[in-house]
Image (spheres, rainbow, N blue to C red):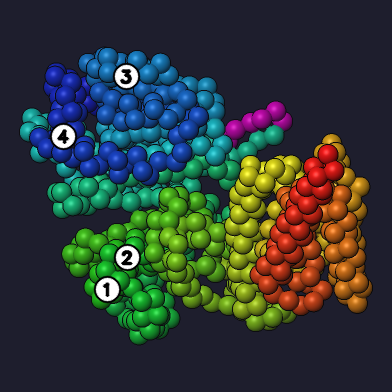
Amino acid sequence: MDIKERSTMTEFWKEHSRQATVEEMMLDSHAQELTLHELPEILSLLPSLSGQRVLELGAGIGRYTSHLLTQASHVTAVDFMESFVEKNRQDNSHHGNASFLQADVTKLDFPKNSFDIIFSNWLLMYLSDEELTSLTERMLGWLCPGGYLFFRESCNYQSGDCKRTFNPTHYRSSAHYSHLMTTTLREESEGAEKQVFGFDIVLNKTVQTYIKMKNNQNQVCWLLEKVGRDTACQEGFRTFQQFLDNQQYTRKGILRYEKIFGAGYVSTGGHSTTKEFVNLLNLKPRMKVLDVGCGIGGGNFYMAKAFGVEVLGLDLSANMVDIAIERAMEEKLPSVHFEVADATKREFPEASFDVVYSRDTILHIDDKLALFKRFHSWLKPGGQVLITDYCCGEKPWTPQFQEYVKQRGYILYTPPEYGKTMYCLSVSVSLCMCLSLSLCLSFCLSLYVSVSLSLSLSLSLSLSLSLSLSLSLSLCLSLSLSLSLCLSLSLSLSVSLSLSLSLCLSLSLSVSLAPSLSLSLSLSLSLCLSLSLSLSLSLSVSLAISLCLCLCLSLSLSLSLSLCVSVCLCLCLSLSLTHAHTHSCNSGDHQGLK
C-alpha cells in the first residue's frame, strides 16, 4: 500500500466532508437534481435484494443505504470518513438491519462467503492500481458463489463541478476496469476440493442521467457475478467475452467486417437486409426495442431514425459496444443506448419491450430455449420477436467444418431444431397459461358450485393439460390423475360418481388404445350420468362429470372441443333441471296426500 497516496486521499476527503452534505459527497453543485434522476436508474440495475446480505463500500452519508435497507436482510455500510458514517447512522439506524463501519477499504477484511451482494458507488477511482487489484481479489472472497458485485466509477475525466485545490482521483478507462475484473482469479478450498472463481460481466453501461443532464458519457457502471472458472480455457481465454474481444471481434477485425457489410454493420446483408426485416415489424413511434447482439449499432440507428422508436442494444463484446457508443455520440440520438451485457443473465422487468430483435447472434448461445423464455417474459402482450441466425445442415459434417465450428465456439442448429425449440417454448407457455386458468376454474367451482376443492383442482388440471398438449395420451394421464386424487381423498363420493370417473378413465384409455371403442363407452358414460342424477347428486358433480365427458366426445367423435363443452353443459343443466322439477312434483304429491 502506498502510504503517501493514502495520506493524500485522506486530506482530500477531509476537505470535502466538513458539512456531510450530498453536494460535498458528489463534488457537484447540482447534486440534488442529479440524485433525483440517477438514484432510481442505478437501483434498477441491481439484482433482487430481497433477503440478501449486502456490503456497501464507500457508503458516504447513505444516499443508497436507505434504499438498500428497505429490501435487504442486512446491510453493512462502510466509509472511511467519520462525519459521513455518523450522518448515515443518524439517518438510517432506525431500520434495525444495518451495521455502520468507519474503515479504510484497503485494510478491510471479512470472512469468506460473507455477502450476497457488494455495492460500491464512486470508490475504486480513489484507490491506486495496486490497492484496486488487492481489493478485487478480496471482494471475490467475501462474496458467496453466484453473488454479485455492482460498482460505478467516473472514467477518463472529472465529472463534478466542485472546485478542488488538488485532485488525487484515478480516472481510468472503462476497458481498464473490465479487464481487471474479468482476469482476477481466486482459488478457494472446500475440504480436499479446490475451485477457482472469477467475475463474469452481467452488464456494463453508461449512466443515462449524466448523458441527458450533462452530456457526459464518462459515468460507467458494472454488474458482475462470481462464478466458477473452468480450467479448460477456450483458445487460451478464461471467459467467452475475452475470447470475443481478443480473438473473434478485435477492434481491427470489427472495422474490417464493417468495410465488407457497410457502415454501421457487421453482419450479412448490411443495411439492405436490415431495412427489409425491420419493415416487417410495423414499428410505431415510442415503441421500445431490445436488440440482442447489437454489434456497432447500425440497425439501432436506422430504427430510431426511421420509426422514432427507443432502442437498447446489448452485446457481450466490449469492443463492439465501445464503437457503438462512439457512433452514438456522432449520431446525437438520445433514444438509442448501448451496454455490454450477457443476455442469458441480464434481467429486465416483465413486459418491458414491444420488440426483441436479434441478428446473427444466437449461434453463440448454448441454451437457446432458456434465452427464448427470457425474451417471452420481457415482451409486452402482442410483442414481436425477429431473429436471423446462421444454421447448419444435418450431420455428419466434414472434418474441416467441425474444426471451424469448434474454433469459433458456435452452437449451430438445423432449421428443424430451431423449430423444435420454438415449439417447446410454445408448449411451455401454453401449459402455464392453462394451469393458471385451471386454478381459477377450480376456485370458482369450489366457491360457487359447492363442489370439493380437491375434485375441482384435479378435474381442472386434467382439462388444462389436455388443452395445452392436445394429445390423447396426456388426456389419459391427466384423467387418471384426476381419478386417483378423487378416490384417494376422503370425499364421501357416491358409488355412481366413482363409476362415472372410472368410465371417464376407461374412455380416455380407449381413445388412446382403441378409438373404435370410444363411442360405445361415451354412451355408457351418458347412462352413468343419468344414474348419478337419479341418485340426487348435485349440479356441481354433474358439471364436473360433463367436463370429462366433453373431452372424451371431442376426441372420439372428432368434434371441436368448444362444441362438446356447450353440448355437455346443456345436457347437464337440462337433466339437473328436469331432476329438480320431478323432485318438486313429487313433493307436491306428498303434500296433497297429507
Asked if labels 2 and 1 touch by Cβ distance under 8 angstroms, the answer is yes
Q: Earlier in the sequence, mark 2 or mark 4?
A: 4
The residue positioned 79% from the left and 42% from the top of the image is 591
Position of 61 relative to 578 (above/below): above
Q: Disc 1 and disc 2: Cα gap in Å?
A: 9 Å
Residue flagged by tag 4: what amino acid is it? Gln
Mark number for residue 287? 2
Q: Disc 3 and disc 4: Cα gap in Å?
A: 19 Å
Q: State the residue position of label 4.
A: 32
Range of magenta residues: 187-192
Is residue 190 located in the magenta-colored stretch of the structure? yes
Residue flagged by tag 3: what amino acid is it? Asn
- The secondary structure making up most of the magenta span is strand
Q: State the residue position of label 3.
A: 92
The residue positioned 67% from the left and 63% from the top of the image is 468
Foreground disc of the pair 2, 4: 2
> Can I make out residue 171 in this image?
no
Instruction: Decide if residue 149 is on the left or right side of residue 238.
Output: left
Position of 587 relative to 246 (above/below): above
